[in-house]
Image (spheres, coloured by chain):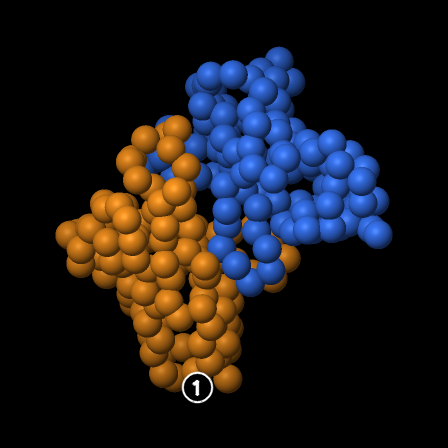
């Protein structure tokens, strides 16, 4: 199956600093990637849809200036958590589909555990 | 609008027993349905999917699910649970708009008792 690689798998940063998370589709091109946030013992919360070559589409309640998304190529999307605070600590996951069809499954990165201290 | 409901945030079964994880959906159009598994601190892995072909879908690791339109259900089953099946399981349905993003159930944590 298709592979989505997410890096880093975990990161600890100081409050006020910024953290960049990368999501790469290794063996396919993804015009669209999705970024999720997952709180402990909860389901996935879609944060934004990342579109190659254009601005990301953010879900209601997600701060655009806080969570910067860049999708500069068909194989790479990045999520930057700016001026991180302890409440931003969470598990972040990206996903992508090979084709933008409703019957195609999404492939997921391994996730990034962010801890802000 | 589509939605997904997973009954039971936790399901506990004994090793070797039948596993049944429930998923009900709401959709005004024929749905595309998915089951994913998540192990601790990892991303999600596809178990199986229903895409309007056979109603009984077989997936990886011995899991299968049956699409029942009359009951709007897509329950996940496995005849005999293994300790390695302990994980979080998510049911999802494709939205029919907006990049066909997935709508997720709340998840069910499967606990396997020795």
Residue A67 lies, with reference to residue B85, above or below; the image says below
Q: Position of residue A50 (x, y in %)?
A: 28, 52
Residue found at the very far left of the displayed protein: A53
Colour displayed for chain B in the image of the structure: blue
Question: In the visual, does A61 lie left or right of B71?
Answer: left
Where is residue A81, by image quadrant? bottom left
Question: In the visual, does B4 lie left or right of A84?
Answer: right
Q: What residue lies at 63% left-to-right and 50% top-to-bottom?
A: B88
Q: Secondary structure at mark 1?
A: loop
Characterize the local packing of mark 1: few (<14), some (14-19) or many (20 or more) Cα atoms within 10 angstroms.
some
Residue A115 lies, with reference to residue B102, above or below; the image says below
Q: What residue lies at 23% left-to-right and 54% top-to-bottom?
A: A75
Residue B82 appearing in the image: yes
Question: In the visual, does A101 lie left or right of B52?
Answer: left
Query: Which chain is home to disc 1?
Result: A
Question: In the visual, does B21 lie left or right of A94?
Answer: right
Q: Position of residue B82 (x, y in %)?
A: 73, 45
Q: Position of residue A103 (x, y in %)?
A: 39, 28
Colour displayed for chain A in the image of the structure: orange
Q: What residue lies at 55% left-to-right and 17% top-to-bottom?
A: B55
Residue A75 lies, with reference to residue B71, above or below; the image says below
Residue A49 appearing in the image: no
Q: What residue lies at 31% left-to-right and 49% top-to-bottom?
A: A33
Q: Nearer the viewer, residue A78 or A47?
A: A78
Residue A93 lies, with reference to residue B78, above or below; the image says below
Residue topped by disc 1: A14
């Amino acid at each position: 199956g298709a592979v989505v690689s997410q890096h880093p798998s975990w990161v600890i940063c100081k409050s006020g600093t910024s953290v960049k998370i990368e999501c790469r589709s290794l063996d396919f091109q993804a015009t669209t990637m999705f970024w999720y946030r997952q709180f402990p013992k909860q389901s996935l919360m879609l944060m934004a849809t990342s579109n190659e070559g254009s601005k990301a589409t953010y879900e209601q309640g997600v701060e655009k200036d806080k969570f910067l998304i860049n999708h500069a190529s068909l194989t790479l999307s990045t999520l930057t958590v700016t001026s991180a605070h302890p409440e931003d600590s969470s598990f972040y996951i990206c996903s992508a589909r090979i084709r933008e069809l409703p019957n195609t499954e999404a492939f997921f990165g391994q996730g990034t555990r962010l801890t802000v201290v | 609008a589509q939605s997904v409901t997973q009954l039971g945030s936790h399901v506990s079964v004994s090793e070797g027993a039948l596993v049944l994880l429930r998923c009900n959906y709401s959709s005004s159009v024929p749905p595309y349905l998915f089951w994913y598994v998540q192990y601790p601190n990892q991303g999600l892995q596809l178990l199986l999917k229903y895409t309007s072909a056979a109603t009984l879908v077989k997936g990886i690791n011995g899991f299968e699910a049956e699409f029942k339109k009359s009951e709007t259900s897509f329950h996940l089953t496995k005849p005999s649970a293994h300790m390695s099946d302990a994980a979080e399981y998510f049911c999802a349905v494709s939205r029919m708009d907006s990049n066909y993003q997935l709508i997720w159930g709340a998840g069910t944590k499967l606990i396997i008792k020795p």
